[in-house]
Amino acid sequence: MSIENPKIPVEKLSTGIEGFDLISQGGLPKGRTTLITGTAGSAKTVFAAQFLAEGIRKTDEPGVFVTFEEHPAEIRKNLLSMNWNIAEWEERGLWRFVDASPQPGDEAIESGEFDLGALLARIEHAVRTVNAKRISIDSLGAVFTLFSNALLVRSELRRLSAALKGIGVTAVMTAERTQEFGEIARFGVEEFVADNVIILRNVLEAEKRRRTIEILKFRGTTHQKGEYPFTVLPDQGIIIIPISAIELKQRSSAMRVPSGSPEMDRMCGGGFFRDSLILVSGATGCGKTLMTAEFIGGGAKKGEKSLLFAYEESREQLLRNAHGWGIDFEALEQDNLLRMVCAYPESAGLEDHLIAIKREIDAFKPDRVAVDSVSAMERVGTDRGFREFIISLASFVKHREIPGMFTATTATLMGGPSVTESHFSSITDTIILLRYVEMLGEMRRGVTVLKMRGSMHEKDIREFTISDKGMHIGKPFRNIIGILTGKPEYLNIDNADRLSGMFQD
Amino acid sequence: MNDTSVHQYRLYVVGDTPAGQRARDNFKIIQEVILSGNAELEVVDVLKSPERAEMDRIVAVPALVRIEPPPSFKIIGDLSDSAHLRSFFAVAGGNDSPQEDGT
């Protein structure tokens, strides 16, 4: 055995699994073995197979797959649904199976001493034949079920692990665990096979499944800590959403873009910043969708493309509503100035929505993004999942340096806080509040710019009306307090004068 | 049951190991005592013919595989547990000597 030079840091092998290289700070430790543990259905086999598939697809690195569970024919078939054509890779000498899966009638009778030397020889042969750089072994728990002597299996797996180190391949081994939180793996395999441990979880929380990946340890090298959500997509495999690993490195621009409403531009001191996130919060029906329509229309006037994610209304409803405000969404679509993506929040998990949004943004390359409404997503995931969704969504948009408008529906009609606001407000640059105002037996609408980073903005709460030409922002409300809290109160003129006088010397 | 055809066995080993040698020696005893000398043995070294081990899906060694007559079966280990093997061969239909109770 060679003694590694402690001065040379552990090299990493880029896995090619989306998001994984970010959270692992470069990939799996090169030339070493990493244990992937998880409960049944936690996507261990997918990870093991994808590790090889991405090596073949992205860097032409051949791989060996050792299977103790599923028959190679099953694996070929299952992974074809991910668009990984293993049979073709086998023909091209890029993928090789070592089949140790149990077959009916294959059970061996044990008589006397034996070891797993044949397995080792077969693995070494397979690695040599295709000149493999990567190897996946699925799964260690299954090896224990093949033989009666667990002690022997242990020592043989230790030998296997050492042999792999000697060959210099980067290895992934999977192992089962019985609980999401508890011992790392069955049979205590983590103690003797791997310096590196990754845990995949598939936790049922509030009736929703949430998949996460955690790098528990990488001996001698660094990685991001904690759990990261991931999803398994039918044509892409595992995609990890590296929330807290996302860097805040976007530049900041002083360039302004029109909001779509000249009065709103004035209230914001000359329009929105080009790379800002705008949160529009208000009760249902008080004009949030209208603001996004204005935002899209304002962009289109300058020839800017907008991408709209609608989670509350269907395409037809949107077309009709926008038409009612004098904005022709259909014409904008034909001119390729608008793309509408309408979906029910419940149609997929939060992670899947997030990836769909990212894909749409990457494909359409919009100049503006609007999401109406973000709060509709609250009901799809857990509170924590929703917070991660919002942070990732914001960072996707920010990275493209385009303005993004997100709407949030307040819990009560008269205003008040919402979950979306509490998660979102600190990362948004601009917050616009829309509120119902009860005045002398009449419902009016009010709008105010609550916050605008890096710019002067109006502090008034202005009244606005809606017509077939869109949104009209009028005069500020006077002699009325408590609009934002949803409890408006009138002041008579004397009181108002006296109050404003209190703050003058 | 009178089986006149020659039995064919294959023994997988990895290199030259004490367990592999013991398996060969023990097979000789089985061949004489249980199979009445009516068996052929081919020894395959996995290091030299890994493809054949792949075909027979050999994981543990030494491994004895019966090729003929069917049904095929696999015995892993150095074949040292003779009492166990004796009863196994009796059930598997490899014993054409009528008196098996006397040792």
Image: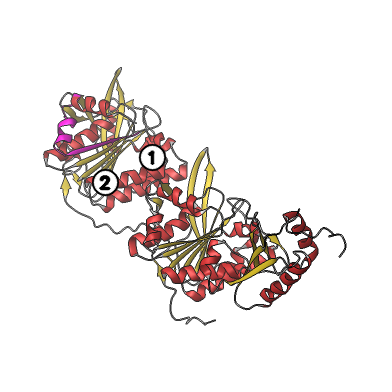
Which picture quadrant has residue A308? Answer: top left
* Farthest top residue in view: A441
User: In the rendered view, would you say B57 is above or below A392?
Assistant: below
Q: Amino acid at mark 2?
A: Ile
Q: Is residue A60 visible?
A: yes
**Mark 2 — residue?**
A361
Whether labels 1 and 2 belong to a single chain: the reply is: yes
Subunit of label 1? A
Subunit of label 2? A
Q: Amino acid at mark 1?
A: Thr
| Front residue of A369 and A450 | A369
Residue A180 appears left or right of A373: right
Q: Helix or strand or loop: what does disc 2 sit on?
A: helix
User: In the rendered view, would you say A165 is above or below B54?
Assistant: below
The colour scheme applied to this rendered structure is secondary structure
Which residue is pictured at 51% across the width and 71% down the height? A164
**Mark 1 — residue?**
A420
Residue A406 appears left or right of A333: right
| Front residue of A465 and B6 | B6
Which picture quadrant has residue A102? Answer: bottom right
Identify the magenta region. A324-343
